Amino acid sequence: MDPTTLRDGARDLLLGGRCAACGRPGGVLCRACRARLLLEAPLTRSRTRPRPCPPGLLPVWSCGGYTGALRALLLAHKEQGRHQLTAPLGALLAQSVAGLAAEGGVTPGAVLVLVPVPSRPAAVRARGRDAMLALVRAAARELERGGVPARAVPLLATRPGVADQSGLDTAARAANLHGALRVRPGPLRRLAGGVPEIAGAVVCDDVVTTGATLVEAQRALRAVGVPVLGSATVAATARRGAEGRRRRT
């Protein structure tokens, strides 16, 4: 068993665990909330679009709004170290990836390369692990179990000087992120030598807000010749427009 899962279980036992979604006593995610998220969210996955939408943003698919239980789960996973949420949230991210792949007409058998948006190194050190990479790896495993070839590949890294995005408006986010990401040569070489047929890269993040981070990730990947299909996130903020509601699957 994953040591982080054991640590979560021990904490719940000692401190009295509560569901991160509804707050009821029990495990990190109670049976009712798990069923609701994993059974209902795939029915509402949709193509989303930030408003205003940054120029050049490729299609983005999400499983729900960044509110209520879904917001609580994402915050608990990333900020509170509730590692047992990695698998269920990864399953939701996999649904978003599947929606994007179906829309893009991906060739059966070709490998989807799931590229996590990188966290700042200081944030990873403070949290004790790369929560976004863990989420993307869980999504890749979920897709593989469903017969969709997928690999999680941490191709991107941040350049020094990138500020925390929280609290920045749309223009400030775009300015902060311009040229902020680079492709790591080692993972790129291994990808080129180890995957015979690539369907394309899917930029993955937990939440889409303004879309500036996704555009910068697309730019960095395309600059080195990596084809990009679009982006997938678990949730989208209220900035998204009505397009997602019209394109539910």
Image: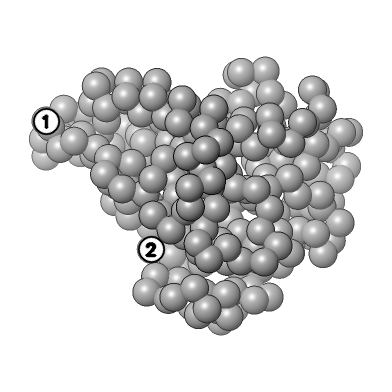
Colour pattern: one colour
Q: Would you say residue 82 is visible in this rendering?
A: no
- Measure how far apart labels 2 and 1 are at the Cα level: 28 Å
Q: Is residue 53 left or right of residue 72?
A: right
* Amino acid at circle 1: Pro
Q: Are marks 2 and 1 in contact (CB under 8 Å)?
A: no
Identified at 66% across, 58% down, the residue is 57
Q: Which residue is mark 2?
A: 126
Rendering coords of residue 6 (x, y %): 32, 32
The secondary element bearing badge 2 is classed as helix
Q: Residue at 35%, 34% (x, y): give it.
A: 84
Mark earlier in primary sequence (2, 1): 1
- Please indicate, yes or no, whether residue 225 appears anywhere in the rendered image: yes
Residue 174: x percent and y percent?
A: 57, 75
Crowd around label 1: few <14 · some 14–19 · many ≥20 (10 Å)? some
Mark 2, other Cα within 10 Å: few <14 / some 14–19 / many ≥20? few
Q: Secondary structure beneath disc 1?
A: loop
Q: Given this view, does label 2 or label 1 mark the residue nearer the observer? A: 1
The mark total stands at 2
Q: Which residue is mark 1?
A: 25
Image location of residue 1, percent across then percent down: 41, 26
The quarter holding residue 140 reads top right
Residue in the foreground of this view, choosing between 105 and 188: 105
Q: Residue at x 45, y 50 (%)?
A: 236
Q: Nearer the viewer, residue 100 or 226?
A: 100
Q: Is residue 100 above or below residue 121?
A: above
Q: Please, what is the three-letter code of the amino acid marked with disc 2?
A: Ala
